[in-house]
Image: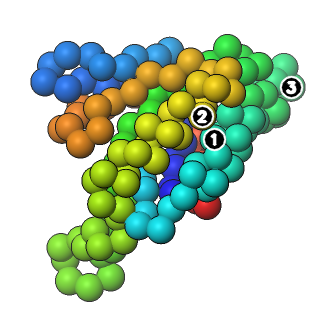
Amino acid sequence: MKLVIQRVKYAKVEVEEKITGEIEKGFLILVGVEQNDTKEQADWLANKVCNLRIFEDENEKMNLSLKDVNGKMLIISQFTLYADCNKGNRPSFIQAAEPKKAEELYEYFKQKCRELGLEVQAGIFGAHMEVEFLNDGPVTIILEK
């Protein structure tokens, strides 16, 4: 699994002109699922992201987690994180998991984050989504397990 985590001041996602998820301060997380990914990897990533200290403390040092700042998560599925552009100009998505498996692990990851005490908003798996956000920093972290 691959996560692209962006520290944001706000983020929202719309499907067919309806907001399906919206947060203020927190993380916008794009989630890609690869063919051989497991629930154990999703567990590790959920624990890591829920405790990731990338918000600034009073000394302007990245030292605070989402829980410390009462932040929220907006989690979006994005199979294009596994695009292979090495050959030609058209990306290949052969490494991305089949939709059924990808959706299962995406839903599992969201639930694990909720179980760890965070508020989670989300897009709709497989839908065409429009995502709007204001990256704070900018801070963008990529995690892969």
Q: How many marks?
A: 3
Q: CA distance from mark 2 to mark 3?
A: 31 Å
Of label 1 and label 2, which has the lower sequence position?
1
Amino acid at dot 2: Lys
- The residue at which mark 1 appears reads as 46
SS type, badge 3: loop
Between 65 and 43, the one nearer to me in the picture:
43
Question: In what element is the residue under mark 1?
Answer: helix
- The disc labelled 3 sits on which kind of residue? Asn
Q: Which mark is residue 59?
A: 3
Residue contact at pointers 2 and 3, CB within 8 angstroms: no
Q: Mark 1 and mark 2 in contact? Answer it, CB < 8 Å.
A: yes
Q: Which mark is residue 69?
A: none
Residue 54 seen anywhere in this rendered image of the structure: no
Query: Residue at 44% across / 22% down in the picture?
Result: 121
In the image, residue 142 lies at what x, y percent?
Answer: 57, 53
User: Of callouts 1 and 3, which one flags the residue occurring earlier in the amino acid sequence?
Assistant: 1
Q: Please tell me which of labels 2 and 3 falls first in the chain.
A: 3
Identified at 39% across, 37% down, the residue is 76
Q: Residue furthest right?
A: 59
Task: Please provide percent x and percent y for residue 14.
Answer: 24, 24
Q: Residue 28: give x, y in percent of width and height.
A: 48, 33
Residue 51 sits above or below residue 105 on the image: above
Which marked residue is nearer to the observer: mark 1 or mark 3?
1
Q: Which residue is mark 2?
A: 112
Q: What is the quadrant of the C terminus in the image?
A: bottom right
